[in-house]
Image (cartoon, helix red, strand yellow):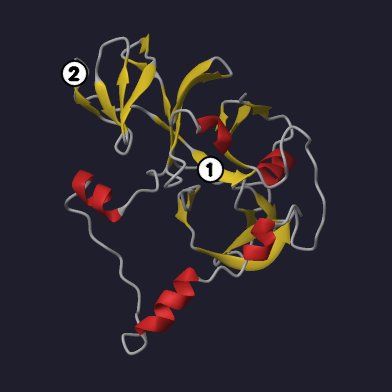
């Protein structure tokens, strides 16, 4: 997720249909500049070299969980063909890229790219803090859904739910103290320092000494290892 504001101007974007390093390129309607969806950098056009600001999004969750945490939410609806509901269901269930996801090829054209630390199509959570890049394999979250870690000396909490693919990363520093977390249930964790319970959907402290405080989110993306490593070859890998 990126901010559409750049140098005080608001841009709108579309899918260019082009690839760069085997990854999708966006374009802005105002200047037709091409942008990498992985780095947010303009790679060709009038704004080449400019950088979109990456934003931290809310974890992928069920509508039930979202509504419980944000009861006043408005829903953006899209046109529906109510005359053929079976067609809608079929379209949702059909994955045109199923063969690509199942293969080991790194590119649409079959191009191979190998960073032997992981298999090409291994899924990771990628983050960037200051000048440091870090990747967390989905498999690292098999025993529990959270990881207390440090990236470039910055304490972070990485969260990933294997069932829903919900992902969130937060800074572990609150009120000048570094917290260490343990899972409680579902999206809730507790810090061992103050005993406060935190909601990882909102990032807010739900109960305890720090109730009302909010953890600062860190932008993160779920991505194939080959793509993350190809764009960020200096990345470290959590083990």
Percent across and percent down for residue 125 are: 55, 38
For label 1, the SS is strand
Q: Quadrant of the image for the C terminus? A: top right
The residue tagged 1 is 221
Residue 110, percent from left and from top = 80, 60
In percent of width and height, residue 23 lies at 68, 55
* Label 1 packing within 10 angstroms: few (<14), some (14-19), many (20+): some
Circles 2 and 1: CB atoms closer than 8 Å: no
How many numbered discs, if any? 2
Judged left or right of residue 56, residue 122 is right
Q: Nearer the viewer, residue 219 or 227?
A: 227
Q: Is residue 119 left or right of residue 16?
A: right
Image position, residue 48 (x, y; %): 68, 52
> Crowdedness of circle 2 by 10 Å Cα count: few (<14), some, many (20+)?
some
Residue visible at 45% across and 71% down?
92
Q: Nearer the viewer, residue 153 or 50?
A: 153
Q: In this rendering, does residue 46 appear at all?
A: no
For image coordinates 22% across by 18% down, the residue present is 210
First of labels 2, 1 by sequence position: 2
Q: Is residue 154 above or below residue 184?
A: above
* Most distant residue in the bottom direction: 83
Could you say which disc has been placed on residue 208 in the image? 2
Write the residue at 48% across / 37% down. Answer: 219
């Amino acid at each position: 997720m990126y901010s559409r504001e750049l140098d005080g101007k608001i841009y709108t974007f579309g899918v260019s249909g082009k690839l760069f390093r085997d990854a999708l390129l966006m374009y802005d309607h105002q200047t037709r500049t091409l942008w990498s969806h992985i780095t947010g950098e303009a790679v060709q056009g009038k704004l080449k070299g400019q950088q979109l600001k990456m934003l931290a999004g809310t974890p992928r969750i069920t509508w039930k969980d979202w509504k419980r945490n944000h009861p006043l939410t408005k829903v953006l609806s899209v046109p529906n063909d109510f005359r053929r509901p079976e067609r809608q269901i079929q379209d949702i269930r059909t994955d045109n890229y199923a063969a690509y996801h199942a293969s080991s090829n790194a590119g649409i054209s079959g191009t191979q790219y190998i960073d032997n630390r992981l298999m090409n199509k291994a899924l990771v959570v990628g983050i960037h803090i200051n000048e440091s890049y870090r990747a967390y394999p989905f498999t690292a979250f098999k025993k529990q859904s959270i990881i207390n870690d440090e990236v470039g000396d910055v304490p972070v909490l990485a969260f990933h739910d294997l069932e829903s693919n919900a992902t969130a990363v937060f800074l572990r520093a609150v009120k000048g103290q570094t917290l260490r977390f343990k899972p409680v249930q579902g999206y809730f964790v507790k810090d061992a320092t103050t005993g406060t319970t935190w909601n990882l959907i909102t990032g807010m402290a739900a109960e305890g000494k720090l109730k009302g405080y909010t953890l600062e989110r860190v932008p993160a993306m779920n991505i194939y290892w080959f793509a993350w490593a190809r764009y960020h070859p200096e990345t470290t890998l959590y083990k």
